[in-house]
Image (cartoon, coloured by chain):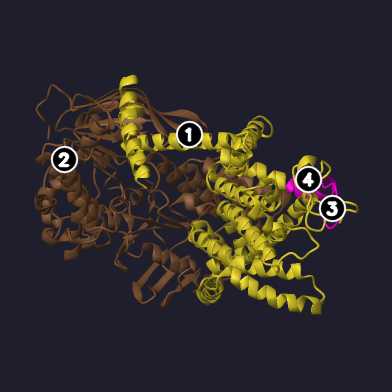
Amino acid sequence: MTQAPDTTPLVKIRDIRIDGRSDETWLPIIKGVNLTLQRGQVLGLIGESGAGKSTLGLAAMGYTRDGVRISGGSVEFDGIDLLTASAAVKRDLLGKRIAYVAQSAAASFNPAHRLIDQHVEAPVQHGIAGRKDSAEDGIALYRKLRLPNPEEIGFRYPHQVSGGQLQRAMTAMAMSCRPDLIIFDEPTTALDVTTQIEVLSAIRDIVAQYNTAAIYITHDLAVVAQMADRIKVLLRGEEIETADTRTMLTAPVQDYTKSLWAVRSFERPAKPAVQTGAVPLVSVRNVDAAYGKEKVLHDVSFDIHAGRTVAVVGESGSGKSTTARCITGLLPPMAGQILFDGAPLPPDYRKRSKDQLRQIQMIYQMADTALNPRMSVGQIIARPVQFYLGLTGKAKRQRVDALLNQIELDPAEYYNRLPSELSGGQKQRIGIARALAAEPRFIICDEVTSALDQLVAEGILRLLARLQDELSLSYMFITHDLATVRAIADEVVVMKDGYVVEQGPKAEMFSPPHHAYTDLLLSSVPEMDPDWLTNLLVERGVDNIGDAAVNEL
Amino acid sequence: MIWFAAALLGFAAIAWGFRFAGQVATGRAPYFRDMTFGVAYGYIFAVAALVWLVWAYLQGRSPDPAVANKFFFLRIAVEGFIVFAIGAWLFRLLGRNVGTKGTKRLFRSMPLTASFGIMMILIYVFVAVFASFLAPYGQAEIIRGVPANIMPGGDIALGGNPDFPLGTDQIGRDILSRLIYGAQNTVGIAFATTVIAFALGGSMGFLAATLGGWLDQLLSRIVDVLMAIPSLIFALLLMTIASVWAPRLGIPQTYFMILIIAVIDSTRVYRLSRAVGQSIVVMDYIEAAKLRGEGMGYLMFKEILPNATAPLLAEFGLRFCFVFLTIASLSFLGVGIQPPLADWGTMVRDLGGFVNFAQFAPMVATPPLLAAGAIALAGRGGQFRGGLDAAPVFGVEGLT
């Protein structure tokens, strides 16, 4: 994928400084970063959330979001200074020579118009091609991006195609004017692994085919390893390191980069096998469930033993979260039952006793919506303490302080803070503390790390593991990330379309022979090897990955 | 008509020239370079309107009374606007320098219209609370030895009396005192009504949002039916019925009015709080509270309400003005606040006939317009306040 070096860079950003307005003052977001991008080259930008990846990506278009300003430095695109260019000049560049692909294609398409109508808008507006020509070109692009039924898919509305297809249609739209530069802002983050791989190979192909330069923003190292020629690592608005992909992966120089690479090595030691005949703490027995008339769970059964972690794996729509809703009683099952410690639980949570409710707690994916934004950390944790244990006054405060210490936050500093004054990882810790405050025996963790950066996620996983050992908790760990499964699970349940496809101890699940779906799932997880995608495509064939392969099962 | 079109075309030419001149003079500074024609046209149009206003104001100050009288109220409006603008600016300056850190920050991020609204509310509240100290006479007091219909202005040559700066009404009551007491009656009753409307509509709305199902359906359909009837006519109808019931039951008619307007207005509050509540009940923290086994009261008032305060407060400001206007309208129609209590709506009705003299003797027409103006200002004040609450939700969060 390496291009012959071109003497004039396409994008030249020099010492750019970008400020964001917060609390009546301008705070620096980007503190002087240089970026050079040659024609046809793909640059990967990686870093944690808040590192300024997206801001830098947008600055390459000479654009800033509201409340953000460029306070210094220069941005040159093909010799044109974008920071001083007039609105007319910029209008002529954006969309035509510079395109942008956002994270959520579903939110970026206008739901009221057909895909092809939105596709032809840019070429027609910029006077590159007529409606008819660009629509034909769109169909050709859809074919190149391996969208199913390319002749007709353009006539659908955004809600009528799947997320992965929409993201590819978005890429086609960005390509419609044959731009010199495309900025991809986390284009696959919201997708399932099997879908992601399809989009990745499509994007990689088309970018190489038209010799387009690209800036690929992501927080997933394995993804960027497949896509980029060079990688730039950002941390809090400053550049840590830039190098060729292979050099970067094999020999990172900086400590921060090394720590990013090392995150994936966390793995708990295997626990001894469960004694035969032991009563499982939670037992899901032949559960069927439905939303209205739509049946979403079919005969789901699995056990969770005391002190164990069961990971429930599957793609979106596989019924993982619905199973959790059945266990908590939010969705009473149609058939089957949930046993707790051998005794059946009432199907509806409203019929359960306070003690039964106390035993089962939940930690949510989005800590932002899981914590009441108007309550302080202390109030959030104190409520279950008071509600279940009846502690008040000093005893309550002591218990809350103890819980805060348990999740490694200083009570004196955090007791009076509001959730909006916490980072993502800290919020998730508060969610854990609230669950612990009830002194439960079983905790459902619903994608608890998927919204977090890798370093922070690892911290949360280590904390959960430590708490499990100290308090002998049982976890049901809902996730789609197999690296998380590898790190924390004792047993694995694979679900697809509401059925349990395969279940067993972790060691067995990660070694062949697999069920065909498990095999597909495992093989779709990107690895740090830059040749991984190329090899996989050779091995399985272009038609045997992603949605196409799922449909064949 | 032709002249008007020609003027508009002329503006277009001037606007083009203005933008061009700006570009040349500033050496193509980004502001003029990227200015669209519409913006340039807007500037020119605004300048033209301002020039006309200045001309009209100077006409109002003309020594010839025939000319000056035509523009009398425009003159007053311009002067009032300038005085209030300066007042609002000073008020904001005060707010920025006095008070806690939170209120200072609030005032710093505040537009002038919002500070005007807050200032108006404070003035109204002050007048309403201290009415009995501020007013020189009683609200129903017919002053002995003083003729009715004294001209406002206090100019003896024109038939005024310096003791009664705003004159007296048709039966010899002091208009200034009645205006001051009117603030107490109208604003006080409007406030009570709005509070009841919010207690009723808010709690029902949250209940419907939390429980859903048949209760939500039932409440929503009742609200639909109530909202389908034009509110003023419905209120008028109910007030007519109440005016028969009130003496029989021995309950003042005002209580009926408060209840009727509160119920009618609570339908709008219900709609809002249900919509806001619905977007809150889907949050995970509500699910967590439900799974904890919390009761309905805790869910509604501890989990949902604190997160709904910003939109509800904004609505409170707006709703207050509508209630206020409804009360004034009902009083104007004769079924609202009953004499001898002073009320701005009744005053407009009683003195309304004088408006006909405005063109010849503007001072004569002033009393009814003063009352009407007070109503209008109260409405504006409330609305600006509402706009303020909706805008910097995040700024206000710092206070709580």
Same chain under badges 1 and 4? The reply is yes
Q: CA distance from mark 2 to mark 3?
A: 102 Å
Residue under label 2: A531
Same chain under badges 4 and 3? The reply is yes
Question: Compared to A311, does A257 lie above or below?
Answer: above
**Which region of the structure is painted magenta?**
B125-141
Residue type of the residue flagged with mark 1: Val
Residue B130: say if magenta.
yes
- What shade does chain B have? yellow
Q: CA distance from mark 1 to mark 3?
A: 44 Å
Quarter of the view holding residue B68: top right
Q: CA distance from mark 4 to mark 3?
A: 11 Å
Q: CA distance from mark 2 to mark 1?
A: 73 Å
Which is nearer the eye, A541 or B194?
Answer: B194
- What shade does chain A have? brown
Image point (16%, 43%), residue name = A204
